[in-house]
Amino acid sequence: MGTESEPGVIPRAVNEVFEYIKRTISKEFLLRVSYLEIYNETIRDLLAPETDNIKIHEDKRRGIYVSPLVEEVVTSPKEVIQVIQKGEANRHISTTDYNLHSSRSHTIFQMVIESRKRNDNSTTLKPGVPHRRLTSLSGPGRMESLKISQLNLIDLAGSEKAVSNQERRKEGAFINKSLLTLGTVISKLTESGKSSHIPYRDSKLTRILQTALSGLAKVVVICTISPSAGSLEESHNTLKFAGRVKKIVVSAKNEEVMDDKALIQKYRGEIIELKEKLEAANEVLQKEKENTQSMLSAERHQYEQELRQMRLVRAALKERINYLSRLILSSSSVVTLPTKDIAEEMAVIDKELTTTGTSGTEEEDPWKLVRNLKRELEQVTAQKTSAESQCAVMQTRIESLEKEIGQYKGLVDKVAHLEAELSVTKAELQVTSLMSKGDKQSSSKEVNTAWETVKS
């Protein structure tokens, strides 16, 4: 990686890619990156360490590839470095007898670059979700010629002799085996006779790099050696390896493909589909706006009718209340009169009984007088019973009328409350209707008047 003042190979390579994109204005590009390691001949996704069962696949269209593998879309060198740093945090690094921080795995950082000619209606693509979560949105008639390039940055683990720690010895055995296979493959490729079998499948490292090692890509190999005299043998073997690598014949070609599953095709198809959805949504919103205006007008008319009906009901209720109030006053007077008459009649009867008992003449028939008095007493008693019954009926009627009056008064209050709410709703509808108009200045005075109505 190097430092900020002296960047290493990876930052320089990444910057060169983006500088090329900046200079090439006739094309549009889409970049996606992945980061994996080969630890003890097991492939791990450094961007998603929890992913299991990662395997190497091959087909005619894509060649050799690793799946499932997270591929993140990047738009700047800074994002690429952030992805690398994220992967480095998950890499196997340990202390050995020779190095304090020694990589115990081979890592492969892959950058896939898709490019095509820029269209007049091209839109800048933004980074989104990882590639494995995308769905193909391309369809018939949307395929275009693409150029797909791949940059592989490989960091090989160092070849070391056996160490004291058992776990380190196991790691070293896998590392040395894969490096030996890499050397064997390169030796086979540099031999004059091309008919011999090349053991790409003996190691996952050589299997993944098969396309690059077979001469179909440009390859740069950086070998490092130690100036120490004690490392003379290791340095000599490293130089022999570098010499064999230089003999590989490179025949890389530029080819354009028709790939309906390329990520740039998916994004372009997604943009087209989203634009269509946006236009459809705008049409729906316009229809909803028109429907809302018509609904507001209909609701306003309905509220006006309900307001007129409420006013008529209110007037009728007031008349009913006045009528019931008059009935109650008449009933009170009716109840009072029979009670007064009964009291006066009883006083007269008592007076007659007293007078008859003390000053009655001998000529009068006492039995006849008793019968008359008894008959009059029965009449008075009947009148009293009738008056009491009438009083009870009138009292019940009074209580019923009072209860009915209470109910009607509650209805009047409710009608008044509903009338107030209708007035507020009517004013709000006026405000909404006025605010939806295009000419705001002409409706300003009406809006203020409506709001004053709402406040009042």
Image: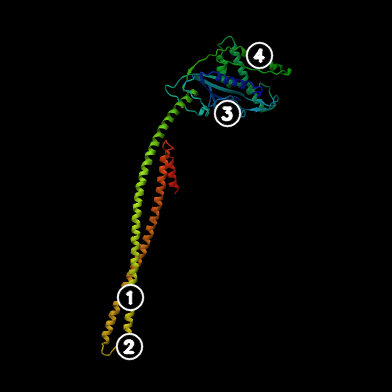
Examine the rendering and report whether any part of residue 419 can be seen. yes
Which image quadrant: the N terminus?
Answer: top right
Left or right of 368: which side holds 11? Answer: right
Instruction: Depth check: give the residue in front, 108 or 119.
Output: 119
Residue 296 coordinates in the image, percent (x, y): 38, 41
Residue for badge 4? 240
Q: Secondary structure at mark 1?
A: helix
Q: Nearer the viewer, mark 3 or mark 2?
A: 2
Q: Residue furthest top?
A: 192
- Per the model, the C-alpha gap separating discs 4 and 2 is 165 Å
**Amino acid found under the numbered disc labelled 4:** Lys
| Pointer 1 residue | 342
Precedes in sequence: disc 3 or disc 1: 3
Q: Nearer the viewer, residue 399 or 94?
A: 399
Residue type for callout 3: Leu
| Element on which disc 3 rests | loop
Quadrant position of residue 17: top right
